[in-house]
Image (cartoon, grey):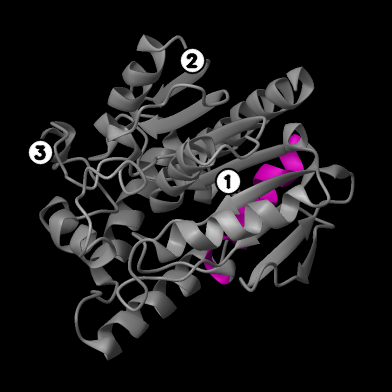
Amino acid sequence: MNGSLVARAVKPLVRARMERRPRDGDDEAALLAARAALDEICGRMVPPPGVRFIDEPTAGVPCERIIPTTADSSRCILYLHGGAYMLGSRVSHRGLAAHLAHAVGVEALLAEYRLAPEHAFPAAIDDALAVYESLLERHDPGSLLVAGDSAGGGLAIALGVRLRDEGLPLPAGIAGISPWTDLAGTGPSLDGNRATELMLDPDRIPEIADYYHPDHPAEHPWVSPLYADLAGLPPLLLQVGDEEILLDDSTRLASNAEALGLDVSLRVWPAMFHVWHMLAPVMPESRRAINEFARWGMRVLGEA
């Protein structure tokens, strides 16, 4: 399958835009330019009508509260944005978080965790933990979902592992959209999907990972949840495109979870690219993936 006509038309445009984006790196100006470019590109995603956005710092972390018109305020998605732990913000990801929250019918809290290289591991997971613990002050854990895309998807799963390790209440479910779960970069799809990858550069994965965890091994379970003992985690959803270099980050983690008897839903989308959900306003596969996320979210929240 090559995807819909819209998807086939969109892919060359995505590739061309990604090839023109500023390169992040050691130079501060280049990094700031790359961050601004991601905000500008992804920030164009139009949210569903009527969604309200409220600046709501939480536990010292900049956050944005996202409130769809029909949201159940007793339930919430803690959303952790992508961006290779170096990029991403409330600006870049508020549209995606709003579409997911609207589809599930709940509120979302979009956390702007600290970024590398200025703030290396464990800054991001410390911030995610602090925000989650603050949410527990006004929410039952069974009314919470933790979700994220790319690096944020890996961070969401790593947060679940840390919560389990520290004996803290677990959310109803954890979802990763094209999650980066293996910062050691050992997945065969890194090379196997090199020709079809639109968003990421496989040759830069080791360099970017080093910015995030310079003082810890890539196999640390809170850095790369692929290497974690996943026992005891709540239901997991993994959505990934079969053209991504990070495909095996999802398939191998799903296999690990299934071997432990966990409730894991692995959804490999044919002919889709990294975090294709971002194109929901124009691409049918994006909308269907968000609806799939919503059905899973409503199921696990209902069961909880």
Residue carrying label 2? 262
Mark 3–mark 1 Cα distance, whole angstroms, equals 28 Å
Secondary structure found at label 2: loop
Q: Which residue is drawn at 51% across and 47% down?
A: 148
Mark 3–mark 2 Cα distance, whole angstroms, equals 29 Å
Binning the other alpha carbons within 10 Å of mark 1 as few (below 14), some (14 to 19) or many (20 upward) gives: many
Binning the other alpha carbons within 10 Å of mark 3 as few (below 14), some (14 to 19) or many (20 upward) gives: some
Q: What residue type is labelled 1?
A: Ala
**Magenta part of the chain:** 91-104
Q: Residue at x 82, y 51 (%)?
A: 68
Disc 1 or disc 2, which is closer to the eye? 2
Q: What residue type is labelled 2?
A: Leu
Quadrant including the C terminus = top right
Query: Left of 112 or right of it: where is 101?
Result: right
Quadrant including the N terminus = top left
Residue carrying label 3? 191
Q: Residue at x 14, y 37 (%)?
A: 186
Query: Left of 262 or right of it: where is 255?
Result: left
Q: Does the magenta stretch include residue 210?
A: no
Secondary structure found at label 1: loop
Q: Please provide percent x and percent y for residue 130.
A: 60, 59
Could you tell me if the residues under marks 3 and 1 are in contact, i.e. CB atoms within 8 Å? no
Q: Earlier in the sequence, mark 3 or mark 1?
A: 3
Eyeballing the image, is 111 above or below 40?
above
Residue carrying label 1? 280
Q: Which amino acid does label 3 sit on?
A: Asp
Query: Left of 36 or right of it: where is 92?
Result: right
Q: Please provide percent x and percent y for residue 126.
A: 49, 60
Mark 1–mark 2 Cα distance, whole angstroms, equals 30 Å
